[in-house]
Amino acid sequence: MRAKWIQPWGGLVTAMRTLTVLPWPGRDADSPAAALPWFPLVGAIIGSIVYLVIMLLGTRLLWADGGAALALIVAVVITGGLHLDGLADSVDGWRGGRTRERRLEIMKDSRIGALGALALVLVLLLQFVALSRLGYSPLGTWIILPYVLARLAQVQLAVSLPYARAAGGTAEHFVTDARNGHFLAALLLAAALCGAIAGRAGLGALLLSLAATQLLRRWLRLVFGGVTGDLLGGASVALETAWLFLLAFGAPYVTLLRYF
């Protein structure tokens, strides 16, 4: 009998339906964790859509700000704002509670606090600035990299951390049923994507992202005792934003190096 975690099409279906609101035909996998190996590919799909918007308005029509704004809106729409909600809840819990239990309790509140709202504003501002600059950059498809790396980070955290709550939550089985094989499959897929997108630079970014995620894993274990769906989403947004900003910052220098 085929192992539950090896469900190629069903895993992709569940991954698409979990990370996006895009319609996708087929039956979900028996185990939600079977979707984890496909997370980097879903990130590449999201990033490709953002790239197309940026290239259309930013490069072809020479309106980088408009392209960045529209790309942000499109990204929020196709992901359902799921990870942004997780970021706001994570920040509220982190800053509002003195114990792990209290932090997790705050995160369950459907209301967004002042710090959570501020985090959303700052993240969207940073992403807008980064995408706006990348609209004039010749790096092109490199825009997809942050979306791939952020989704791989979710798999890395899900596999390496326990579920922080006693029970319940939409991400419980993604975490409790996660296995090293899920991460290995996701890592190989992410490596192929990063190599195809940016060559050796993409593979270097992958290594840096793995190291950064490992540091984040230690912090999540210390502060929250593990991970939840909100924390996975929040971590994804944080890393995605950091990579977009770093890419935008380094774009002129990378472009200059091409002439030597």
Image (tube, rainbow, N blue to C red):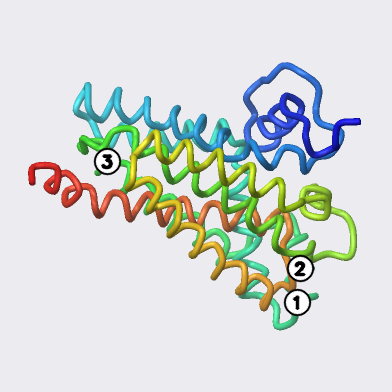
**Which of the labelled discs sits on residue 182, or is there none?**
none
- Is disc 2 surrounded by few (<14), some (14 to 19) or many (20+) residues within 10 Å? many
Kind of residue at badge 2: Leu
Kind of residue at badge 1: Arg
The image position of residue 87, as x and y in percent, is: 59, 57
The image position of residue 248, as x and y in percent, is: 28, 49
The answer to whether residue 162 is above or below residue 24 is below
Q: Circle 1 is placed at which residue position? A: 100
Q: Earlier in the sequence, mark 3 or mark 2?
A: 2
Q: CA distance from mark 3 to mark 1?
A: 39 Å
What is the quadrant of the N terminus in the image?
Answer: top right
The image position of residue 159, as x and y in percent, is: 71, 56
**Which of the labelled discs sits on residue 104, or is there none?**
2
Say which of 224 and 2 sits in front.
Answer: 2
Image-quadrant location for residue 35: top right
- Residue under the image location 79 percent in, 68 percent down: 105
Q: In the rendered view, does 144 fall on the left or right side of 114?
A: left
Most extreme residue toward the left is 260
- Residue under the image location 20 percent in, 48 percent down: 254
Say which of 75 and 228 sits in front.
Answer: 228
Q: In the rendered view, does 257 fall on the left or right side of 112?
A: left
Q: Circle 3 is placed at which residue position? A: 134
Most extreme residue toward the front is 1
- Residue under the image location 63 percent in, 33 percent down: 20
The image position of residue 22, as x and y in percent, is: 62, 24
Q: CA distance from mark 3 to mark 2?
A: 37 Å
